[in-house]
Image: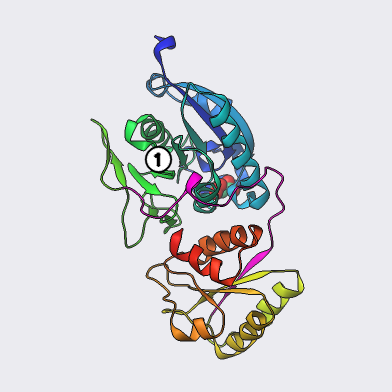
Amino acid sequence: MADSKLRVAVIGCGGTISTEAATPLDFIDYPETGRKLEIDEVLAALPEAVHELAAYVPIPFRAVGSSAIGPGEWAALAGIIDELAAGATDLAGVVVVHGTATLEESAYFLHLTLNTDLPVAFVGAQRPLNTIGTDAVVNFAAAVRTVLSPEARGKGVMVVLNDEIHCARDVTKTSTYRLDAFRSVGWGPIGVVDADRVHFHRAPLRAHTAATPFRITADADLPRVDISYSYAGADATAASAFLEAGASGIVSAGFAPGMPTPLERRFLEQCAASGVAVVQSSRVGSGRVAPRCYLEDKHWIAADDLTPQKARILLMLALAAKHDLAAIRADFKLY
Ligand code: GLU
């Protein structure tokens, strides 16, 4: 019975999960040849069994590939979800339908900024909605079942693909085309979505959502932070261009266990000495960058186990909140 269904808001951002490919086997060219559907069209394309799970409240936001989503969209999304959570007391949860390219970044931003414990799950797909063997439908159903689970409340923003529930902080896309692309490298998912039930086996320990100090207005103009990627022989050309462009922070995606080339290092030392926030992360995709003596002495910040793209988000928020060096170092331990 329609009336007895729980209400789930579904925010449309686009992505592969919202794409109608031109042919049933197009897993590759669809960004150019396919059509991005609006969220009500996505919902209309889903089978009846998915509509039996909940009553959907479609919220059109964007219908784009997620390479076109960035800080402006993150702040606007945070505003939309906080408003939904504050206004609609009968809402059971929120599902954000998003492209996989930047999904982990949007999700982590909201994990740090939302002011609610309403379950929020990001979902994407590796194959377009109308292709053979698409993961769009099953992933969407899993995300809905996740936010409807009583255990989902208070877990922060979750990312649901391939029957797994990941914490937005830990998850990253690890493959271009494989269906098991999303992984929380080193830590694993926080739960699974099985046919009989949604099962959480751990909770995130780092503070998130309402327990962070990062409140953002929907039209927030976030400080510019760039990522300087190290490779053998790299000099400081990129980092100095970022500074020239107005960066107030630079994240070094350095070699493991956490250092750039000598030329980059010399330049970044000057940056840190002049008050630019410098975060040392690693380009290898797993493991911590520890706050070793060198970083402490030169006023750099250790990224801990955050990937460079996640470290950038935390640094943007810390700078927006006017945190000083000591506070930013604490942020990288807390969140
Ligand atoms: N997976 C891509 C995304 O992040 C789809 C590519 C595209 O349609 O631009 O949206």
Residue named by callout 1: 154
Q: Is 134 situated above or below 233? A: above
Q: Residue at x 64, y 46 (%)?
A: 75
Residue 181 percent across, percent down from the top left? 40, 53
**Residue 192 seen in render:** yes
Along the viewing direction, whichever of 332 and 42 lies nearer the viewer: 332
Q: Is 335 situated above or below 29? A: below
Residue 42 percent across, percent down from the top left? 53, 29
Magenta stretch, main secondary structure, is loop
Q: Residue at x 51, y 60 (%)?
A: 310
Along the viewing direction, whichever of 170 and 274 lies nearer the viewer: 274
Q: Is 214 situated above or below 54? A: below
Q: On the image, which quarter does residue 34 sit in?
A: top right
Looking at the rendering, the stretch of residues picked out in magenta corresponds to 203-230
Q: Is residue 204 magenta?
A: yes
Q: Residues within 10 Å of mark 1 (few under 14, many from 20)?
A: some
Along the viewing direction, whichever of 87 and 16 lies nearer the viewer: 87
Q: Is residue 198 magenta?
A: no
Left or right relative to 114: residue 173 = left
Q: Residue at x 60, y 46 (%)?
A: 65
Residue 197 percent across, percent down from the top left? 26, 32
Q: On the image, which quarter does residue 200 sit in?
A: top left
Q: Residue at x 52, y 28 (%)?
A: 9
Question: Is ligand 1 within 8 Å of the beta carbon of the residue shown at mark 1?
Answer: no
Q: Is 248 situated above or below 28? A: below
Residue 153 percent across, percent down from the top left? 39, 36
Amino acid carrying label 1: it is Gly
Quadrant location, the N terminus:
top left
Along the viewing direction, whichever of 181 and 260 lies nearer the viewer: 260
